[in-house]
């Protein structure tokens, strides 16, 4: 399937068939795509909760009550759900972990180039700390790049998906003890295969025209 066909056919799934499960090989492919997601200065500020058990799905829905209750069935009937988490800060320890990972795979020709990279990365982090929204907002922007990668990868694999922002992040963070780990939940992605009852599968895709979206200079 070519890329344009994938983009044309993917859509936001509204109802899942609880009897269908994503094959393990496809799930592993999807998770590897997430691992390889690009990020600014390769900060990789994310952690992913891969939810597969019924108990864990139920725990996710604790954050989907009241005005968000309509999202709970998507989670409960999904094959898998991924909670995309973002670091709340960047510690010196984490920066050291990144630079040592770079060094372990041979990205530096000598100690000087390693130190230069460490200084540059820390400089950018310090710069973003002073920006509007701070370092956490910058990092969360990177996490949404990972969401985009996952959506397209899922569609390529024939897996249906639903990105979900309608949940109480404070409740979800508490449910999985994320705050103590220096993380916060940013977005939730339900994955699986559509139900015959999914009304959205039968509707035409609605997008603004090229003339409205693109300015070629």
Image: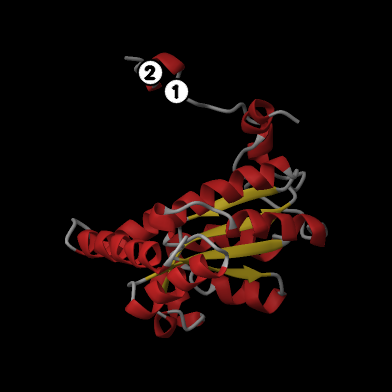
Q: In this view, does 125 lie above or below 162?
A: below
Disc assigned to residue 208: 1
Viewer can see residue 168: no
Q: Position of residue 22 (x, y in %)?
A: 78, 57
Q: In the rendered image of this protein, does residue 29 appear above or below residue 98?
A: above
Horizontal relation, residue 56 to residue 127: left or right: right
Total of numbered circles in the picture?
2
Q: Nearer the viewer, residue 76 or 84?
A: 84
Is residue 74 found left or right of 157 in the rendered image? left
| Residue shown at the point (18%, 56%) measured from the top left | 132
The image position of residue 152, as x and y in percent, is: 61, 42
Residue 36 location, x and y as percent?
Answer: 58, 55
Label 1 Cα crowd, 10 Å radius (few <14 / some 14-19 / many 20+): few
Q: In which quarter of the image is residue 70?
A: bottom right
Q: In which quarter of the image is residue 48?
A: bottom right
Q: Is mark 2 on a helix, strand or loop?
A: helix
Q: Element at badge 1? A: loop
| Relative to 117, residue 91 above or below | below
Residue 14: x, y in percent? Answer: 62, 48
- In this rendering, does residue 173 appear at all? yes
Q: Which mark is residue 156?
A: none
For this rendering, which residue is in front, 46 or 192? 46
Image quadrant assignment for residue 67: bottom left
- Residue at label 2? 212
Left or right, 60 with respect to 17, comes to left
- What residue is drawn where x is 35% and y is 72%? 88
């Amino acid at each position: 399937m070519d890329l344009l066909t994938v983009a044309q056919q993917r859509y936001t799934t509204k109802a899942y068939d609880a009897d269908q499960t994503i094959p393990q090989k496809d799930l592993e492919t999807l998770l590897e795509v997430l691992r390889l997601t690009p990020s600014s200065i390769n900060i990789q500020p994310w952690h992913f909760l891969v939810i597969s058990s019924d108990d864990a799905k139920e725990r996710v829905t604790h954050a989907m009550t009241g005005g968000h209750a309509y999202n709970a069935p998507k989670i409960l009937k999904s094959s898998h759900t991924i909670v995309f988490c973002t670091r709340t800060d960047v510690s010196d320890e984490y920066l050291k972990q990144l630079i040592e990972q770079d060094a372990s795979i041979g990205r530096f020709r000598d100690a000087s180039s390693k130190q230069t990279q460490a200084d540059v990365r820390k400089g950018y982090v310090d710069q973003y700390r002073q920006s509007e929204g701070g370092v956490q907002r910058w990092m969360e922007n990177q996490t949404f790049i990972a969401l985009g990668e996952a959506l397209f990868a899922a569609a390529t694999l024939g897996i249906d998906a639903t990105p979900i922002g309608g949940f109480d992040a404070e409740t979800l963070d508490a449910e999985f003890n994320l705050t103590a780990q220096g993380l916060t939940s940013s977005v939730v992605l339900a994955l699986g295969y559509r139900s015959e009852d999914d009304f959205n599968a039968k509707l035409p895709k609605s997008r603004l025209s090229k003339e409205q979206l693109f300015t070629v200079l």
